[in-house]
Structures are given as structure tokens and as C-alpha cells.
Amino acid sequence: MIIVIAGKGGVGKTMVSSLLVRCIAELKEDAKILAIDADPASNFADALGTKPSMSIGELIENFANVKKVNFLDYLQQKISENTTHTEKFDFIEMGQGEGAGCYCSVNDVLRFVLEEKQKNYKFVIVDCAAGLEHLSRKTTTGADVLLIVTDLCEAGFRSAETIKKIAVNAGVKEDTMFLVINKVKNEENLKILKERIANTKILEICRIPYDENVAEYNACAIPLINLPPYSKAYIKIMELAKFLIG
Ligand SMILES: Nc1ncnc2c1ncn2[C@@H]1O[C@H](COP(=O)(O)OP(=O)(O)O)[C@@H](O)[C@H]1O
Ligand SMILES: [Mg+2]
């Protein structure tokens, strides 16, 4: 099952992605899980408390120095070598790497990685870039679930609508797309929120409160995956994980 997490920058994609990894690992102890950081500006590894090996972008750049090897064979081998293994999940960082001399872009390779890895992992969780380039056919056609995250800002909702359009054009079925509303505070104007949600025409699947623990962990650079189990964000994402994977 491939779960893709998309949305505007800063809305909480990495928070949702990292807690989903944890919750799925807790719910399905024996399942193999792969976390993919597809956001060059991301901190998914930090949120997961892991250290990335060489990114796919770097591997692509290094290919220029490798002679007489088929690119896909090279990639397959190097991706395996550069997958980080932890007790609960594996991790790959796409990174950047479209410098001169590159054989192809990281985005092109993401699709290949997904196809390859889907065979070996029961769950693949992709933390997407804020830009919409990943939401091309290359990524989303394989997605079983597309979670579109937004906070309460209008711009987040606008992005959500654009992401939905791109995904629909790429052939993603609407019944696999869900809206996740994050950082909701008690004093929020619920009437406006309701209107904004309705305008997206995306089914709301999860509403996550503003969580002081998340803010504090981020401020202190503590991996979010270690949030205490009574944290509001963790509790909500556990509900989400149960819904998604049963
Ligand atoms: N539910 C929440 N409560 C409080 N702060 C949050 C919450 N979700 C995310 N944040 C904060 O918002 C910022 C952006 O979150 P992040 O997951 O990095 O977003 P993205 O990956 O979409 O750019 C971080 O500083 C994080 O601590
Ligand atoms: Mg992020």
C-alpha cells in the first residue's frame, strides 16, 4: 500500500508522515514499512530520528562517473545499498540532483523506486515536496491513498484544491483522496472552516488539533516519532492509521 502525503509547505506533512510510520509500525508489528522523503527541503529523517545514507539525487549524479553499467541496474543496486534500515522501518531520501550531466531527474526516478519497492514492502509512506512536481503521473498513479494536508490558512486550502486537480488529471481516483486538517485551535471559526472544507470537495478524514508537544519537539529538535502517546497529534493519527489499514 502506497500512502502519499501532499500539501503546502509548513502545513504538517512531515509531522503526519512520521507519526503515520510510527502508528502503522505499532498496528502491524511484522509489516515491512518504507518511508520515502520526496521533499528536497524536508526533515523527514529528523522527524523519524534516523540518518539518511546517500540520497537518490546523489546516486544519480554519481552515475556520471560510472562506466559501462546499465543505469537501471546501477540504480537498483545503489538504492538497496543506500536504504537506511531501522528496527521498525526502512528509509530512503530522494534529495536533489539535477546538476549538469545527470542522466535523469529525481522525479523520474521516484516512480521507479516506488515500483521496485512496492514489491518488498507492505507499506510505503511518501512525504512529498510542497511543490506540485511530485504529483505528476509519476508518483500518484501508484498511490493507494493520497492524503492532502492543510492547516487553517486559506493558502493551504487553495493548494489542496490544486493538488486534487493535478491528481485527478493524473488518473488518481477521487475516492482515494482525503483531506487532513491540521493545527486546529479551539478558538477557530468553525463556520469558515466548514465552508473551506466544503469548497475543496475532498472528503475530510482527520482533524488534528494544535499540539504543543509537536511544537516543542520541533523547537528542541527531538524526533517527532517519539512524541508521548497522550499527544493529541499522535492520538488522531493513530485513528487515521486504523482507518486506512484496518
Ligand atoms: N498539530 C500541530 N500542532 C502544533 N504544531 C504543528 C502541528 N503540526 C505541525 N506543526 C508545526 O508546523 C511546522 C511545520 O510542520 P511540518 O510537518 O514540517 O510541515 P511540512 O512538512 O508540511 O512543511 C513545524 O514547526 C511543526 O512543529
Ligand atoms: Mg516537510
Image (cartoon, grey):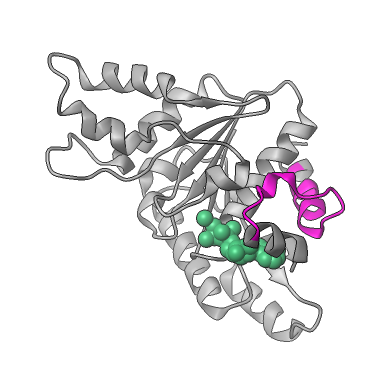
**What's the residue at 79%, 46% (across, down)?**
238
The reply to whether the magenta stretch includes residue 209 is no
Viewed as shown, does residue 64 lie left or right of 174? Answer: left
Segment tinted magenta in the rendering: 220-241
Residue 231 visible, this orientation: yes
In the image, residue 178 lies at what x, y percent?
63, 56
Total count of labels: 0
Quarter of the image where one finds residue 186: bottom right
**What's the residue at 61%, 26% (across, down)?**
86
Q: Residue furthest right?
A: 230
Q: Residue furthest top?
A: 68
Viewed as shown, does residue 44 lie left or right of 40? Answer: right
Q: In this rendering, is residue 188 above or below 156?
A: below
Location of ligand 1 given as a quarter of the image = bottom right
Residue 148 visible, this orientation: no
Quarter of the image where one finds residue 153: bottom right
The reply to whether the magenta stretch includes residue 228 is yes
In the image, residue 245 lies at what x, y percent?
72, 37
In the image, residue 13 lies at what x, y percent?
57, 56
Q: In this rendering, is residue 75 above or below 213?
A: above
**What's the residue at 48%, 69% (across, down)?**
159
Q: In this rendering, is residue 184 above or below 91?
A: below
